[in-house]
Image (cartoon, rainbow, N blue to C red):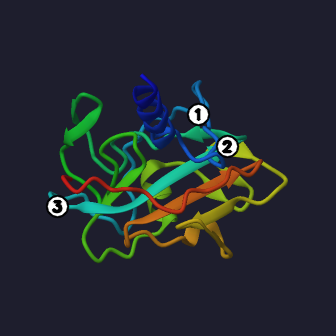
Amino acid sequence: MFGLIALLSSLVAALSPPPHVQPVPIAVGPRYQLPPGAHAVRGMRCTARSTVPIAHVELFVRRRAVLLPAGIGIAPPRRVTDGTVASGRCAYPFSTRDPTGVVYGEPGSRATLADVFRLWGQPLGRHRLLGFTSRRPLRGFVDGVRWHGPPRRIPLGRRNEVVVELGALVPPHSFYLFPETQ
């Protein structure tokens, strides 16, 4: 009996997050849950293309996670299955297929965070993220390290973990485990 209890307690400990990781609630409401938009962007063509995961982007506003919606950069009509955009009329150079924050692009892409926000049709500025503003400047992190330039210039393309925060600090993740089956 003692052996079974020891085994169960070790399994629970192994499945628990490290003590420094705090869960962050997902923001709800129309100000936080934005549609993917369908914006044509000057200099970007919408074509049939093959893309791969190039980055994972996490957004935080006021200690709440804001999800990138499925379908950024994929022109309607979109075919959606189980919350994942399977196809659209065409795709721009950068897109999202589901609300996980994974951004897809062409291999060797020179995308920046600003490119994704332009396709999404949402603002990204020094003191602004989406429809929110703050006296404190927007902060960016790449692979857990503070980005010292404007967050809009954060490069995407090396399967990097990008965290952008407005307001109170949320300890950034240093990596994202990309599924290899994508």
* Mark identifier at residue 61: 2
Contact flag, marks 3 and 2 (Cβ < 8 Å): no
- The residue under label 3 is 49
Residue drawn at x 41%, y 40% as measured from the top left: 36
Rounded to the nearest angstrom, the CA distance separating label 2 from label 1 is: 9 Å
Q: Is residue 175 left or right of residue 66?
A: left
Would residue 80 be found to the left or right of residue 173 on screen? left
Q: Earlier in the sequence, mark 3 or mark 1?
A: 1
Picture residue at 69% right of the left edge, 61% below the top? 139
Image quadrant in which you'd find residue 131: top right
Name the amino acid, label 1.
Tyr
Residue at which label 1 appears: 32
- Earlier along the polypeptide chain: callout 3 or callout 2? 3
Residue 56's place in the image compared with 37, above or below, is below
Three-letter residue code for mark 3: Arg
Q: Nearer the viewer, residue 46 or 35?
A: 35
Return the x and y of residue 111 as percentages of the image width and height: 41, 70
Res 126 quadrant in image: bottom right
Looking at the image, which residue is at 53% across and 62% down?
Answer: 174
- Residue shown at 54%/70% (left/top)? 154
Q: Give the SS element for disc 2.
A: strand
Viewer-proximal residue among 89 and 66: 66
For this orientation, the residue located farthest to the right is: 135
Q: Mark 2 is on which residue type?
A: Val
